[in-house]
C-alpha cells in the first residue's frame, strides 16, 4: 500500500452541505466521496484529452445533453 498524505481542505458551507449529503445518501465517508470524485475527474480528463465527448442520456426520453469541460 502506498504512503498516505494528509491535507486540509477549505469548503464553503454550500460545498460542505453537498459533501455531507452525498456521504449520507451513499453511506460512505467524506474521504471516500473525495477519492471517488478524483478518480472520476481523472477518467473524464483522460477521455477528453483523447478527444472523447461526455454525454448524459435520459433513460426514458433518450434525450442527450453534452457535458462541456473547461
Image (cartoon, rainbow, N blue to C red):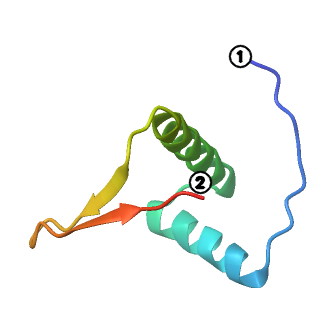
Question: Which residue position is annotated with label 1?
Answer: 1
Q: Residue 20 lies in what quarter of the image? A: bottom right
- Position of residue 67 in the picture relative to residue 62 (left or right): right
**Residue ranking furthest to the front:** 51
Q: Residue 41 at x, y = what percent?
A: 57, 46
Give the secondary structure at mark 2: helix
The quadrant in which the C terminus is found is: bottom right
Q: Residue 28 lies in what quarter of the image? A: bottom right
Give the secondary structure at mark 1: loop
Question: Which residue position is annotated with label 2?
Answer: 33
The quadrant in which the N terminus is found is: top right
Q: Residues within 10 Å of mark 1 (few under 14, many from 20)?
A: few
In the image shown, does 26 or 17 lie closer to the viewer?
17
Q: Residue 47 at x, y = what percent?
A: 46, 36
Q: Residue 53 at x, y = what percent?
A: 37, 48
Q: Residues within 10 Å of mark 2 (few under 14, many from 20)?
A: some
**Residue ranking furthest to the top:** 1
Amino acid at each position: 500500500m502506498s504512503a498516505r498524505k494528509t491535507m486540509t481542505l477549505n469548503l464553503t458551507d454550500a460545498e460542505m452541505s453537498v459533501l455531507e449529503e452525498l456521504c449520507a445518501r451513499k453511506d460512505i465517508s467524506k474521504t471516500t466521496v473525495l477519492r471517488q470524485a478524483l478518480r472520476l475527474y481523472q477518467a473524464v480528463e483522460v477521455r477528453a484529452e483523447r478527444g472523447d465527448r461526455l454525454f448524459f442520456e435520459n433513460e426514458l426520453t433518450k434525450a442527450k445533453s453534452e457535458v462541456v469541460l473547461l
